[in-house]
Amino acid sequence: MVLLIPRSCKNYSYKRSCYNFKTYVGITGSCDGGVKSLSGYCYSKHCFDYAYRGCCYKYRTYVGSSGSCTEYGVKSYTGHCYSTSCSFYPYSGSCYNHKTYVGTSGACTGVQLGSYCFSVKPNLTSANYSTSCSGHAIHGTCYKYKTYVGNSVSCSNGVTLEDGYCYSSSCEIYSYNGSCYKFKTNIGTTGPCYAGAESPDGYCYSNYCWYYSYNGSCYKYKTYVGGSDTDRCSYGVKSYSGHCYSTSCPFYPHNRSCYKYMTYVGSSDACTGVRSGSYCYSVRPNSTSARNSTIFCSTYTYHGTCYEYKTYIGSSETCNDGVVSEDGYCFSSSCHNHAYNGSCYKYKMHIGSSGICSGVRSDEYCYYAF
């Protein structure tokens, strides 16, 4: 019988094996490439990160002669902190207490990566920061804006905490009342502002758009009105593609679009707009519908058709793009001259406050049909 006598180890021994490094990692810490004891020590033969005094550490950060070293770390006489874990911002084998957005021109007292500065102490040399913070102090860093982004919106220029708020030094698009937003929409004084902040001048600032976004704003309705008629989008904003974006619909809303006409066409009549059951929704009068169709018109109806303008022309004038009634009125769907108060006039003359008007007066102007 041969009795095995354990050989002596140069550094550390654990369970009849010899190791070069013995590092305390705690009960929950990892021990990659080694053996972990029940007391929280990691025994390993090789160190692929940073070795210091017989221990192997994952992070080595310069904190200076006066800086402190936490996170179960050990400070060396050279001013470096060796640690096995990092609760703040790890970068390139070091652990930093602060991550500050400085952009392309802001100074950095630590290590800069792109537009961010990683530092042990607050980055006080940036133009956005000072020793006294008038904004929001987070982890020793001062931020100007605080915006709720939840879990689905990114925080590109700052840091996000567990409560869903993004703390940043600048805003990419819109800023209002100390927060950053992606959309700024004119809703007037009565329009709703969904999941956003409404300003006194009638704007809605938000980071979400559940409907249609266009040119940095969020709209509830998107309606194709064509490229020639600008007056068909008087209640919204018209795009180059001929769509009208609006936050409200003063006429007939249908499937997130706003139509000026809703015509009953039954089951057999054609529809020049969008059909829904027995009704036709359109931005222009549904001219292909039968005479017995019922049209819901918010302006003027004549012989079962809806028109936008009604102008008295008598018996001597022509009626472009419309029909003339027996009593001398021109019903039309467009106006190529001067529109005022639901009528289309051929002439518009400035007469001042004391001038005589034989047509229809509006402040200092006089409208004439002939």
Image (cartoon, grey):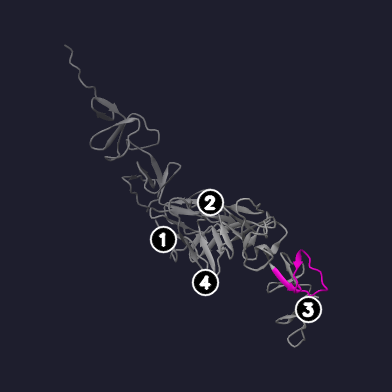
Q: Label for residue 349?
A: 3
Give whichever of 14, 86 is nearer the camera.
Answer: 86
Sequence-earlier tag: 2 or 3: 2
Q: Is mark 3 on a helix, strand or loop?
A: strand
Residue holding disc 4: 200
Residue flagged by tag 3: what amino acid is it? Met
Q: Mark 2 points at which residue?
A: 115
- Could you tell me how far apart the alpha carbons at marks 4 and 3 are, in whole angstroms? 37 Å
Is residue 319 visible in the rendered image? The answer is yes
Q: Distance between the residues labelled 3 and 1?
A: 63 Å
Q: Which sits earlier in the primary sequence, circle 1 or circle 2?
A: 2
- Residue stretch rendered in magenta on the structure: 309-328
Give the spatial CA distance, label 4 vs label 1. 28 Å
Give the amino acid at mark 4: Pro
Secondary element type, mark 2: loop
| Depth order, front residue of 217/294 | 294
| Percent x, y of residue 159 | 45, 53
Which badge, 4 or 3, is on the more N-terminal residue? 4
Q: Report the disc number at residue 137.
A: 1
Mark 4–mark 1 CB contact (< 8 Å):
no
